[in-house]
Amino acid sequence: MSLRFQAINNLSKDQATAKPVGAKITALFGDNVFTLKTARQFLSEEGYKSLVGSIKGGKKIDRAVAGQIASGIRAWAESKGVTHFTHWFQPLTGSAAEKHDSFFTIKSDGTPLEEFDGAALIQQEPDASSFPSGGLRATFEARGYTAWDPSSPAFIMEIGEGATLCIPTIFVSYTGESLDYKAPLLKALESLNKSAVEVAHYFDRNVSKITATLGWEQEYFVIDEGLANARPDLLLSGRTVFGAAPAKGQQLEDHYFGSIPERVYAFMRDFENESYKLGIPLRTRHNEVAPAQFECAPIFEEVNIAVDHNVLLMDVMTRVAKRHGLVVLLHEKPFAGINGSGKHNNWSLATDTGVNLLAPGKTPKNNLMFLTFFVNTIKAVHDYSDLLRAAIASAPNDHRLGANEAPPAIISVFAGEYLTRVLTEIENKVGDHFDEQEEAVLKLDLHRSIPELLLDNTDRNRTSPFAFTGNKFEFRAVGSSANCANAMITLNVIMAETLSLFKKEVDELIEKGEKKEVAILHTLRKYITESKAVLFEGDGYSEEWEKEAERRGLPNVKTTPLALDALVTEKAKHLFEHNGVYTHSELEARHEIELEKYIKKVQIEARIMGDLALNHILPSAIKYQNVLSDNIKGLKEAGLGEEDYASQLRILKELSGHIRAIDTKVHELIERRKIVNNMTNTRTKAIAYNSEVKEPFFDTIRYHVDKLEHLVDDQFWTLPKYRELLFLR
Ligand code: ADP
Ligand code: MG
C-alpha cells in the first residue's frame, strides 16, 4: 500500500490532545523568561542596576558585573532544571541557530563543577563557516562571533524533557561585519530613535526615546503529518509543486473565521501555552480564508523583541505540531489555486512619554505631530519603495505577490478616505508664500479633530501592501516564512533618513525666520506633493492598478532577482551607510546572499519536480496505461468492435500525450539547469533560474501532471491529493 493510503488509514489514530494547563495565562506568562522581575530576585543590586542600565539606556555592562549576571542567570536556569546553554542567533538562513554547551566543566584538579562565567554570557565563537556570509568571510577565516544582546531577555527553551538556556545574541564576523538580522536591526532602530526624537522635540521636549513597535500576524497551514510525509515536495520545499485543484477549494468561503477544527485547536492551545511561557504575548487565533489555513497574532511589542518572538514562535509551532501528528507549513504558497500566507507587519512609533505617534490626536497640536509622522512615513515609502520591495523579496514570496489574492509587487500606500482628504487640503490650501492668513487657515483645518471613528473607517482596503489602519501602518507584503527583521530594518532606516531630512528642511525655514508650525506645514505640503503618487485607495489586485501604477512611474518588479537590485544602488548604499546600518561591503554581501538563497530554492524545487515526475507520476500513469491496454486487448480477443473500446483508446492516447510531454519537458529542464548552473555571476544565474528554469518549465510540467491526476485510476496515484491534504484531519 502506498504511503498515501497508509496515511489516510492512520488518520484517526493517535490524535493528541492539548496538554492540560488549568491556569490562567497570566500564571504561565513569561515563566521561562529572565524578566527584570526575575533578575531582581537572582541578581545582586549591582548586577541588576547594570542590566537595567543596559536595557533601558543602552549602557555597556562591564566584564566584572557580567560575571555576576551570568551566575544569577545560571542559578535561575538551574532552578528550572537547565543543564545547557546556547547563544541564540538569527543567521541569514532565516531560522534561528543554536549550539548547546553544558554548564558542566572540570577544574584543573579534576573536580567537576557547573559554571557559567561572564565571558560565556557575553561572547561565543561558533564555528561559523557554514552560515551564509556573501563572501564577507572566507571559509579559511571561519571565525565569527556571537555577542549578547541584553535588550532581549534570556529564555529557557523546553524540548521534550530537556531545557536549554538561550541567550539572544547578534552574530558578526571576526572583522565586525554583521552576518545576521539582529545586528543591523538594532542599528536601524537606534538611528530611527535619534531622528525621531529630534523631530518629536518640535512638539514635546519631554520625549527622550522613541521605539518602533511591531505586531505581526502569522498565517500558516496545518496538515496531517502522515499525508505530508507522503509528499516529498512538501517535505523538502514546504510547497506542493503538483496537485490538481479539488472540486471544492475556498469558493464557499466557509473556512474563514469558521469554528476551529478540534485537532488543530488542541495544537493551537499547546503551542500558545509554550509561547506564553516564553513571554510571547499571543492574543488572536482564527481560521484564515483557505481551507487548512490559520492565523495567530500577538499584542505588539518593541520591534527587536517582536522579531525574536516571531522567530521563536515559528520554531515552537513547528515542534509542537509534531507532537500532534501535524505539520505546520509556513511557506508563502504551499498550494496553487488557493490563498497563500503572509505575515502582516503592523508598525508604529511610540514615545517614552506614552504617545503613539501614528495615532491621530485630540488637539490641533497633537494632530500636527501625528501628521508629521504620518506624512514622513508616506514620503519614506514613496522614496524608497524599491527597497521595501527588496526587503520582502524571496523565492517563495514570488509565488504569492501579485497572485490575485495577495498584495501586488507594486508598493503603494493606503491612507483611507478621510486622511487622503486632509492631505489634499494641506496640499491645496497652503500657498507657495508664507503669510499670516495661511497660518490661520491651517489652524482652522487642524482644529477639526480627526474622528476616533477613523479606526473603523480605514481598515476596509485589504488589497494594499502598505495600509494605514487607524493608529499604525500595516506592511502586508511580508511573506509568512520571512524573518520580519528584513522588512523592519528597511522600514525603520528609511523612516530615520526621511525624518532627518525633514528636520533639516524645517530648521532651514525656521532659520529664515519662519514660525515653527508654518515651517512644518510647508515642509509637509512639499512632501505630500512629492510623494502622492504612492497613495492608492483602489483595488490593488486589479489590472487597472497595474496600468495606473505604470503611468505614475511606480516600480513593479515581479521577480526576486531583479527586485534585489535595489539593495546595491548608490542611493541604497548611501542610505544604509549614512544611518550606520550597513557598510557598502555588508550591503553587497546581503545582495549576494539573497541571490544565492533564491537560486538554491528554485534549484531544489526544480529537482523535486524532476524526481516526482519520474518516480511517482510517470510510473502511476504507465501502470494505468497497462490496465487500459490489457483491457483493450481482452475486449478485442473477445471479439468486440472498436466502438466498444473507443473510450479506453481515447484515454490511453491522452495518457500517452501527457506522459510524452512530461518526459520531454523534465529532460529539457534538467539540461537547462546544467547550463544555468555553470553560470558564474550570481545575479545572472539567479535571473536565469527564473527566466530559463522556472518560467518556461514549472507551469508546463505541472499542467500535464495535474491533467494526469484527473485521468489516472485513483488507486494508482501515490501522492496525497489536494482534497486530502486540505480537508482531512
Ligand atoms: P487585523 O487582522 O484586523 O489586521 P489583528 O488584531 O489580527 O488585526 O492584528 C493587529 C495587530 O496589530 C496586532 O498584533 C496588534 O497588537 C498590532 N498593533 C496594534 N497597535 C499597534 C501599534 N501601535 N504598533 C504596532 N502594532 C500594533
Ligand atoms: Mg491585519
Image: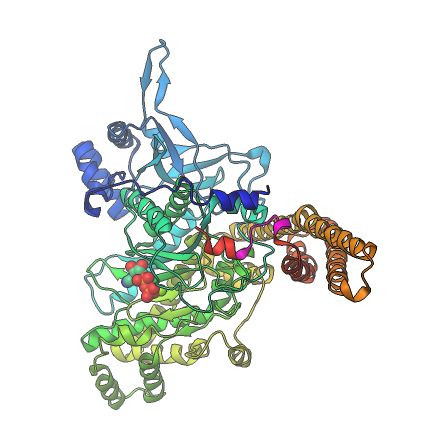
Instruction: Give, as a single range, the part of the protein colored magenta.
Output: 715-722
Q: Residue furthest top?
A: 109
**Residue 663: within the magenta?**
no
Q: Quadrant of residue 694?
A: bottom right
Estimate the x, y position of residue 112 in percent, counting from the top left.
34, 14
Question: 700 or 554: nearer the eye?
Answer: 700
Q: Main secondary structure of the magenta part?
A: loop
Question: 227 or 504: nearer the eye?
Answer: 227
Question: 128 or 194: nearer the eye?
Answer: 128
Q: Residue furthest bottom?
A: 437
Answer left or right for 176 relative to 111.
right
> What's the residue at 73%, 51% (across, down)?
627
* Up/down of 66 relative to 392, above or below: above
Estimate the x, y position of residue 493 in percent, counting from the top left.
41, 59
Estimate the x, y position of residue 678 in percent, counting from the top left.
73, 48
> What's the residue at 48%, 56% (across, down)?
726
Total tally of numbered discs in the picture: 0
Estimate the x, y position of residue 558 in percent, counting from the top left.
57, 66
* Up/down of 655 relative to 541, above or below: above
Question: 631 or 575: nearer the eye?
Answer: 631
